[in-house]
């Protein structure tokens, strides 16, 4: 490995606005989705342990989780393919075979409770020894969201890019190859600690962008002419990326941002006399010369701290509370993000953040996302949320009516009037 060439590649890759590093790893929603996916995996484990998981993938809690992972930007596109039921091959064999299903659930539980790499590797080898048809290293995509500093994600492009970078020959579909690739990724991260995060999603993103030919791997050492040509290619890609970034910035110049919508809901809630909570990881965002969390609650009511779901509920985009500290309305802003993740956070709220919860649930999104939200709420896994009467609040209605609601509105009547029930 030519260390100087790899360093040059990483530096330019980090600056590329279209790279996985910029579009996913630094994506403001990424860490929020970690919590939602972990919560979803807990539901999968519990259903398997209770014997309630069922015999099909379609409509299962696993489909919800894997679907949410598959929506985590381009790097995870297709992550659900390995879990889709293939009837002719009868794989993956965790739906029709109860023993294999229990082994899969036990594997997930072990991974969720593991406190080090040895326990995770032992769990992998134990699962691999069962030789469950169709259940291979694609499961690492679940492990990554449980232990991002210990287990990298895994797909065809990542393997291809890793082989190009390291001159190795890791193969898709074998756990031993995955573990060998993992060791190499950790070494690569350690060698470039100043450039790569200890979250292995960063080095996996680099491998992905090389594997999809967005960036070329450096040539082998000793070939000066190949190195010069590679440097020219890097310069060309960098110039093209800069042009693409300018075009994208121009396209989005008039677009409403996720933060803007949260600010509208914050201001509207306060005008209507509610105490407002803004998602814990968004409170420090800059907005109109101040911070998004200014004038909002510093902590959730004490009743939330006694619930296991409190950590996830703190990440709901906006919550409104009455004078007694009761949740009156919950808002998830789905600007361009995974709809499943937002609904799963609401599911946590419904499942016990507050006894006998009777607040209104709102999905706030661009006008053209309504059908997508309806389809998600029809999934059996979200039946409990749907039963609460989720409402859809389009951006256009919020924009058009928020000032009048703030001046003349009372309670939730006005915002109910401009939103509509989804189920």
Image: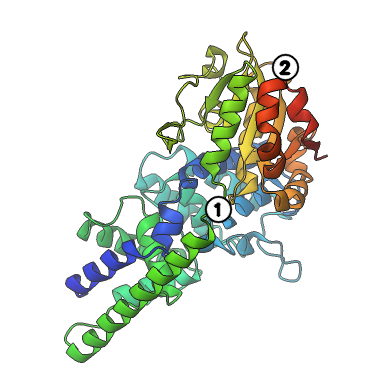
Q: Is residue 355 above or below residue 203?
A: above
Residue 33 location, x and y as percent? Answer: 53, 44
Q: Position of residue 191 (x, y in %)?
A: 20, 60
Furthest-bottom residue in this view: 225
Quadrant of the rendered structure where residue 15 is?
bottom left
- Residue 418 position, x and y percent, is 77, 34
- Asked if residue 100 shows in the view, the reply is yes
Q: Quadrant of residue 84?
A: bottom right
Query: From the viewer's perspective, is residue 94 above or below residue 91?
Result: above
* Side of 191 relative to 214 (left or right): left
**Who's the residue at 73% across and 42% down the image?**
381
Q: Position of residue 181 (x, y in %)?
A: 36, 65
Q: Earlier in the sequence, mark 2 or mark 1?
A: 1
Q: Is residue 168 visible?
A: no
Q: Nearer the viewer, residue 31 or 15?
A: 15
**Label 1 sits on residue:** 254
Q: Nearer the viewer, residue 12 or 117?
A: 12
Element under label 1?
A: loop
At a point 30% along the width and 73% down the height, the residue shown is 166
For the residue carrying disc 2, how many other residues have a C-alpha within 10 Å: few (<14), some (14-19), or many (20+)?
Answer: few
Q: Nearer the viewer, mark 2 or mark 1?
A: 1
In the foreground, 72 or 306? 72
State the mark number for residue 337.
Answer: none
Residue at mark 2: 356
Instruction: Please say which color scheme the image uses.
Output: rainbow
- Determine the residue positioned at 34% across, 73% down: 238
State the residue in front, 27 or 33: 27
128 sits to left or right of 187:
right
């Amino acid at each position: 490995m030519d260390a100087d060439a790899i360093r040059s590649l990483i530096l330019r890759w980090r600056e590329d606005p279209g790279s996985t590093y910029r579009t996913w790893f630094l994506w403001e929603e990424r860490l929020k989705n970690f919590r939602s996916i972990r919560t979803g995996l807990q539901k999968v484990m519990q259903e398997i342990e209770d014997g309630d998981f069922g015999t099909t993938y379609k409509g299962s809690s696993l489909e919800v989780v894997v679907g949410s992972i598959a929506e985590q930007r381009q790097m995870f596109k297709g992550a659900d393919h390995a879990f889709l039921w293939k009837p002719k091959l009868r794989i993956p064999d965790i739906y029709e075979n109860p023993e294999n299903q229990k082994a899969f659930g036990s594997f997930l539980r072990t991974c969720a409770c593991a406190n080090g790499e040895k326990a995770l590797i032992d769990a992998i080898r134990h699962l691999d020894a069962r030789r469950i048809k169709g259940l291979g290293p694609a499961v690492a995509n679940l492990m990554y969201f449980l232990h991002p500093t210990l287990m990298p994600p895994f797909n065809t492009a990542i393997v291809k890019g890793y082989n190009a970078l390291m001159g190795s020959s890791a193969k898709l579909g074998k756990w031993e190859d995955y573990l060998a690739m993992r060791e190499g990724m950790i070494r690569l991260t350690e060698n470039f600690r100043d450039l790569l995060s200890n979250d292995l999603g960063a080095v996996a993103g680099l491998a992905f962008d090389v594997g999809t030919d967005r960036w070329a791997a450096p040539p082998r050492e000793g070939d000066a002419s190949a190195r010069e040509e590679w440097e020219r290619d890097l310069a060309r890609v960098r110039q093209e990326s800069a042009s693409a970034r300018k075009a994208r910035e121009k396209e989005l110049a008039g677009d409403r941002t996720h933060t803007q919508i949260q600010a509208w809901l914050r201001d509207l809630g306060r005008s209507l006399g509610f105490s407002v909570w803004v998602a814990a990881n968004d409170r420090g965002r800059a907005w109109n010369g101040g911070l998004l969390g200014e004038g909002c609650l510093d902590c959730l009511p004490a009743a939330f701290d006694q619930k296991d779901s409190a950590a996830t509920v703190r990440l709901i985009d906006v919550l409104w509370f009455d004078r007694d500290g009761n949740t009156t309305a919950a808002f998830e802003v789905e600007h361009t993000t995974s709809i499943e993740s937002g609904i799963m956070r609401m599911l946590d709220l419904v499942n016990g953040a507050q006894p006998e919860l009777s607040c209104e649930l709102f999905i706030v999104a661009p006008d053209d996302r309504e059908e997508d939200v309806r389809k998600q709420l029809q999934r059996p896994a979200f039946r409990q949320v749907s039963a609460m009467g989720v409402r859809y609040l389009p951006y256009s209605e919020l924009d058009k009516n928020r000032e009048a609601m703030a001046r003349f509105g009372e309670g939730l009547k006005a915002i109910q009037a401009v939103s509509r029930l989804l189920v």
